[in-house]
Each structure stands twice: as C-alpha cells, then as structure tokens.
Image (cartoon, coloured by chain):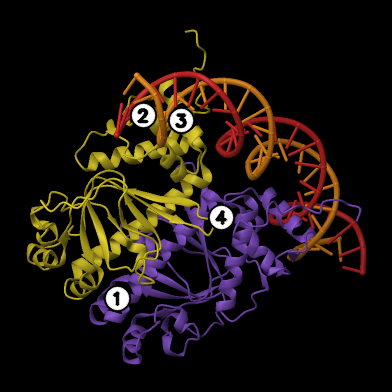
Chain colours: A yellow, B purple, C orange, D red
Amino acid sequence: MSEPVQIIDFSKIKATCSNCNLHELCLPHGLQSKDLEKLEVVVKGSHPIEKGKHLFRTDDSFESFYAVRSGSVKVYVINESGEEQIIGFYFPGEIIGFDGIEHHKHVSSAVALETTTFCSLPYDKINDICMQIPDLQNQMFRLLSREISNENQLLLTINKRSAEERMASFLISLSSRFKKLGYSAKEYNLPMSRQEIGNYLGLTIETVSRLFSKFQRNGLVKINRKAIRLENLPAIHAICDGFSEKTKDNNSSSA
Amino acid sequence: MSEPVQIIDFSKIKATCSNCNLHELCLPHGLQSKDLEKLEVVVKGSHPIEKGKHLFRTDDSFESFYAVRSGSVKVYVINESGEEQIIGFYFPGEIIGFDGIEHHKHVSSAVALETTTFCSLPYDKINDICMQIPDLQNQMFRLLSREISNENQLLLTINKRSAEERMASFLISLSSRFKKLGYSAKEYNLPMSRQEIGNYLGLTIETVSRLFSKFQRNGLVKINRKAIRLENLPAIHAICDGFSEKTKDNNSSSA
DNA sequence: CGCTATTTTGAGTAAGGTCAAAACCCGTGG
DNA sequence: CCACGGGTTTTGACCTTACTCAAAATAGCG
C-alpha cells in the first residue's frame, strides 16, 4: 500500500482559495482579496483519500475543520450500543468538523464515500485570523448557524414526515446542492448506499428500496443502481411539501 | 392589563454578568473580569415575559441572542403545512437564537413556557467585542458547536431509539440540566405539556401518556400532573442505554 | 466464472398512530 | 361552597405504516 513513487507532497501545496472554483460556496465567501491571502496561508490542501478512509473519528483530537473539495463525505455519530446515526452527507464547498470545537475533540466521525479531496482549516489559526478579519469571523458564525438550521430542518423532516416524504426531501436536497455546484439538478449519482440513505432518514434499507421502486413505477424517477434521474421534479416537490394526498400507487401489473 | 404602577425599567438595568449566578454556565464562562465588563455593557436584562409570549418568531429580523435567566423556553420550527417541530427546551444559562445568524432573520420561534426572564445579547455588538476578546470569540464558537452536537444527539435518539428509550433519555436530560442549575436531579416540574413532549420526541400525546403510566406502574417514576420524581434513576438510565431487554411491564392487575 | 455484497421483492408482524370516550384538573361564577 | 365548562390527560379498541425475517435477483470483483 505504501507508494514511494509519489512525488508531489500535497500537504505542501498551498491551496489557493482565490483560484478555487468553490471559493464563493466555501469559507472564503464574502472575503476581500487581501483577507483571502491571510486565509490561504493557513489552509492546507490534501492528498486524495479513497473511499472508506476516515477524515476523523469520534474522540480524535480536534485540530481542523475540513472543507470538501471533490468527492463526498458522510458524517455520523455512534451511541453506547455502537449504533451509527448518519448526521449528514457533505459535498464540495461544504465544511465539516464544527462539532469538535466544544471539547477539543471530535464527537462524530467522517468517512469518504468515494475518492475525496479536501482542505484542512486549522482551528487555532482560523481563530487567530478571525480576530483580524471581521468578515471571516462573521462567515464562521454564519456557517455554524447554517449547520444548526440544517439540523433543525432534518429533525422536522424525520419527526413529522412519512417515509415517502422523507425520501422525496432527500432527493430534492441532493438535487439543489448539485445544482449549486453547477451540476445537473435532474440527474446525479448517489454516492451512498441504500443502507446509508435509510440510516440517515431513519428508515430500513428495505423501505428505501421499496420507495425507489414505487417512485420509479409512478414515473417520478428513473433509477439504475447509483444513477438517478428525477423525471418529475414538481411531483417530487409536491410530496416533500405534504401535498399529493396519498400518492396512489399504480401498482397494477396490467395497464 | 396595563400596570402603570410599574416603576422599574428592566431594559435600563444593566444585567451585571459578574453578579449573575448563572455566569459560569452562560456566555461569560471563562472570561476574565476586565473582559466581563466589556460584555456587560451590551447585555440587556428584560422584563419578565409571561407564559405563551414569544421572544421571537420565524422571519423576525435577527438582532440578538437571548440567554434564559429564569423560567423556560421552547424553540420550534414550522414547515409549509404549518406543522410545528420543537427543536429544544431551554433553561437558565442556556442561549437561544443561534440559527438566525445566517440570514439575519430567525428561522425558528421561541416562546416562554412559564413566566421567564432573559438577557438580550445583541449580535452586532457581541460580534464587535469578539474581535477584541479572544476568549469570547472562542466561547461563542464553543456554544455554537455545542448546539450542533446536541442536535446530533437528539437526531440519534429520535432515529434509533424506541418510544420508551426516547422518553427515558428525555427525563434524564432534564434531570442532569436541573442538577447543573443546583436543583434536585430526582424531582422537578415539567414546564411543558404532554403534547409538547410528544412533539419534541416524535411521539403522539397518547404514547407519552401511556409511557408515563407504564413508567409509574413499574416504579421508575412518580408523576402528579407536571410534578415528576425519578424513583429509580439507574433503571431509567438503563433504558436510555438500550439495556433492560424489553422493560417487561407489570401490567397484571393481580399481584 | 463463481463468490460475495448489495439490492429488490414478498409475507407476516409489531410498535406506535388514530379515533373516541372517559377522567381529571382548574378557573369562574352563582 | 359547589356546579359548570373548557382544556388537558388518560385509557381503550382498532388500524396502519414501516419493520423483520427470508429468499430471490442483480451487480461487482477476483
């Protein structure tokens, strides 16, 4: 597994936020270019890490946030009984690790769902720079705040919505995030397994699978393993919002 | 209802954090006294507000955080269909409103569960002071971080645990928070209705009621309307942690 | 090409929800 | 002091959604 051939030391590459196309979606959002330079000094790019490798685990000492540059990451917590609860899936421009600040150690774990690159944002240094750049401090607060409202929304979805509605929200959420990244809002790959979708949404893998089949039968989506195309976005939105009185299933084999 | 007799203008009273007994549980935690003085200048105490009154509502412009001084507050979000999801209950020393930072307006609502007093922490000013007091910036980050991990835990509880386990966690959570405030860990009043407990935990009011009855039948608690005494804390803890193989119910009338 | 992991589908079940009614609590006014 | 009325809580009977268990189908990999 050791690769002595590797010449490039990614950790030495200065990740130049200014040139990064995620720039406006990420921590630097709203910073002026002179401030950006200060930030760039402390941000470190990374080797690509492969699917299944952890960025950090629960109880690891907390040193940095991580900004996803490419690929995707799942973040989860574990309880006493060893059960895993996925807290979120993270895509380029999104930042993880905020929950580590309080106790100076991570209380969640983060693992790559596919080959993934990211930038490290060392907390102590970010902290220092925040004291000099009001916009950056503000942006940090904003990102933390966003994380909180995202979780509020997730809680609402899980606690108040049926399996079908949760699944629809999930598909829409991915869609809009991919769109923001400049990808198609209608067609994307699911980087996570059915298992992981179920875990995240509080459903079993069987229920997830049945819902995919049902959505497909009803012409809402076209699914081929990990590839999904949203065929009827308005209808999916309608399910999200709790309309579509019962989503009657065209279950009949004849037709 | 107007009381012209009222002389004291609470909003003019400088809430002196230094003298506040919640001091170490609240925003000032870890600040040196000279820094505390700077903070005190911007913190404003409040009139008591009565049960049912809102501190803020969704879409209100976001100006301040609020630190609960006495009483209790519930925070909730609402979806398109008008359904309410309670995000948390807040007690003295706890701070609410963090989710408003991102869009400069509140995305949740906060309402007093009983007569409640609080301090206003104006965001812009806190922001400014953070630029001068590293410890304060740090504390802000810590509090935001804590809010995130709390929600992670809640998500885990709701998504992975049975009704019974959720209820047990809830009782324990209240217990430990009251204890931190110097109150009894075994005996307290529930400031919220059964309805609200159910909403928070993702259960119906009937299920909440049945669980209270069951817990009482099995000698875990003694409940009289809002008053609750935890009779068997270890057993309640055991349920939380998923032990207690099925919590067999002594449902038999004979015995 | 065969092995394993993942996904899909089916049949039966259980936990918690729904609907309805009774009990209780508390404030109000006679 | 007691009767009334509205709201909340409790209890009961029944039902539905999503879970469990099991097996078949499919995909991915050596």
Check if mark 2 and mark 1 are on a common chain: no
Pointer 4 chain: B
Q: Which residue is mark 3?
A: A209
Pointer 3 chain: A
Residue at image position (70%, 65%) is B226
In this orientation, which residue lies closer to the viewer: A219 or A48? Answer: A48
Check if mark 4 and mark 3 are on a common chain: no
Q: Is residue A9 above or below residue B9?
A: above
Pointer 1 chain: B
Q: Which residue is mark 4?
A: B200
Q: Which residue is mark 2?
A: A234
The span from disc 3 to disc 2 (Cα, nearest Å) is 22 Å
Residue B157 visible in image: yes
Q: Which residue is mark 1?
A: B137
For marks 1 and 4 on the same chain, the one whose residue lies earlier in the sequence: 1
The span from disc 4 to disc 3 (Cα, nearest Å) is 29 Å
Residue at image position (39%, 31%) is A236
SS under mark 1: helix
Q: Amino acid at mark 2?
A: Pro
Q: Is residue B90 above or below residue A68?
A: below
Q: Is residue B192 left or right of residue A136?
A: right
Residue A147 falls in image quadrant: bottom left
Q: Amino acid at mark 3?
A: Ser
